Image: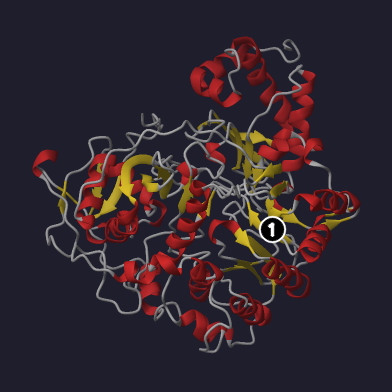
Amino acid sequence: PPLEQRHRHTTTAMKFSLATVGLAIAAAAPSAVAFAPASINPHNAVSSSTRLNVQMEAPKKSLPKIEKLKIASDYLREPLNEQLATEEIGISKDAYQILKYHGSYQQNNRETKGPKDWQFMLRLKQPAGELSPDLYRLLDDLSAKHGQGDLRATTRQCFQMHGILKGNLKTVISSIMNIGSSTVGACGDVSRNVMSTPASFTSPDYQYVREYSKVFAQLFRPMSPAFSEIWLDGEKAASVETWAKEVESYNVDEAMLHDNGRGIILSDSTEPIYGTQYLPRKFKIGVTVPGDNSLDIYTNDIGCVVIMNDAGELEGFNVMVGGGMGRSHNKESTFARAADHMGFVHKDDIMEVLKSIVAAQRDHGNRDVRANARMKYLVHTLGIEKFTKLVESYYGKEIQPWRPMAEWKYNDWMGWWDQGDGKLFYGQHIDNGRVKDEGSFRLKSALRVIVDKYNIHSILSPTQSIIFRDIDPKDKDGIEAILREHGIAPIEEVDPNARLAMACPALPLCGLAQGEAERLMPSYIERMRALLDQMNLPGEEILMRMTGCPNGCARPYMAELAFVGDGAKTYQLWLGGSPVLTRTAYPFMAKMDRDKLEETMEPILAMFIQQRSEFEAFGDFCHRVGAEAIEKYMASYVLGSVTA
């Protein structure tokens, strides 16, 4: 049965403008109202969700600035092209907004005094997290020559590098494009990097996950020629994108351009799906098999689960919609949300259904209020039934019921695994995704030696780590020896809580960070382990995450225990996420002093010791008892009075 999704904000008042959202609240009963795409139904009449009090605003007199900027950009060319040609070390705010679509963010080291020392972070597009040995060598070289000397694995299975100067951007991006990779669509109001389970098993279901991740990446790629014009001087890349070649048999371009006459395809020869305004906000897609929730699938705008028949053949996909993490402090109209189950889609129809979902968000998402522009707010406002009808109005058929499937489990796929074809894969844990050499810890050098010696292909994991795939069993000892020689601890010596943890980069380069994350999280893991040992819980595993701001890049709101920066040295404390990542946590405390971790957590752990059910996980316990009961227990708790 569908998972029960509990949200604290079911009565939140939300504001949607009639003009740009494209939705009108009809006075008729829900049963009397039908959905139709904007291009077909001039009245755009739909009913409001009974789950929300929708507070209507008068249409704005004009489009928001960001929407005007997208239209005026000439398909993501200007003012970026003009700004790149100046002698300034940075670019204008408007050019920066357009640069995001090209895969880069302009940053400044906030700990450096004096004038802004503008530099650029560049993020790759790596569908399914895949990375060839040649691409890894290139990134390793580019980061040393043009970056700050390290690489960072992100929570969406791609590498990013920091510290690139404006004058070197073209060299770096063109090098990446010419080797058969890309940065296009790694950022911006388009479909971002398509995620998947990183396990490289060779069974048909896992193979379909990898294939369709690339299909969906290709289906929703921005089509503007601006990328080759700006970075390759209008020439074609020396090599076609690797994933595009791998899914040629799916005829993705034909499927993309197929027009069923129901408003999916726009009369725009450059961007037939996105148009001049692209999407209202970023859009995220994930793909996995039943039972494998290593990718946090409920946090995506669209989640697709491969469904096989009894003969081991692909039948179709269970599709979920409306997940997303971003929110704002002190703004109750913004919230994290786990996706809803929409239904089952046959394999022959999956591209058309995904196009229909994207078109629904494109036409009806909130372009007036950017904080409410993600598709999760559209799904939440309409409710899953009405949103499904909206999608069906583009698709032209009914979505079938969700298929029963295996219960979700979480695995980070670290350590050694048999792929199923006689080869092995090995998951190497990376603390918070930072690939660096620091003292005797020389992870960056170790990875380069492994790639050079064994010409190994790899996959970045959703937990900021790396998996080496297709390993000959005879090479296992050699790989372990290289890691050991470079000061890398074997996976058995890594604290399980460190393996479960994630943190965003935050300070000093992120302009949105209110506090620390990546640099603080290792000490928090150590302090939590010491506290667990002190309370006689030495084997307890708690999925912890930390971000420097509420935007949720490290997906904190799904964690059992999360710390979300709400000040220079304070954090919101979130509790109650699922250990298998199927529900959102709840905010428990604001402004927790970062130096008071132990005195804050000890009473909660004490209650957990005394009142947990057998084998109950920490997140499940906090979800079951709720915030009010924990607050009541803490009020009378005496520090040091309880151990297991």
Tell me where residue 73 appears, x and y as whole percent.
41, 79
In-image side of 270 versus 482 (left or right): left
Label 1 sits on a secondary structure element that is strand
Tell me where residue 113 appears, x and y as whole percent.
75, 65
In-image side of 608 versus 335 (left or right): right
State the residue at coordinates (47%, 50%): 286
State the residue at coordinates (37%, 33%): 404
Q: Quadrant of the N terminus?
A: top left
In the depicted structure, whether residue 116 falls above or below residue 459: below
Give 640 or 535, whichever is nearer the viewer.
Answer: 535
Q: Quadrant of the C terminus?
A: top right
In the depicted structure, whether residue 6 falls above or below residue 360: above
State the residue at coordinates (73%, 49%): 430
**Residue type, label 1:** Arg
In the depicted structure, whether residue 332 falls above or below residue 195: above
Give 110 or 611, whichever is nearer the viewer.
Answer: 611
In-image side of 319 versus 80 (left or right): left
Q: Residue 561: in sight, yes or no?
A: yes
Give 516 or 177, whichever is nearer the viewer.
Answer: 177
Tell me where residue 419 appears, x and y as whole percent.
64, 47
Q: Circle 1 sits on which residue?
A: 152
Q: Residue 365: in sight, yes or no?
A: no
Give 416 or 548, whichever is nearer the viewer.
Answer: 416
Tell me where residue 498 appears, x and y as whole percent.
72, 38
Coloring applied to the structure: secondary structure
Report the number of numbered marks. 1
- The crowd level at tag 1 (other Cα within 10 Å; few <14, some 14-19, many 20+) is many
In the depicted structure, whether residue 488 falls above or below residue 179: above
Which corner quadrant of the image does residue 54 belong to? top left
Which corner quadrant of the image does residue 231 belong to? bottom right
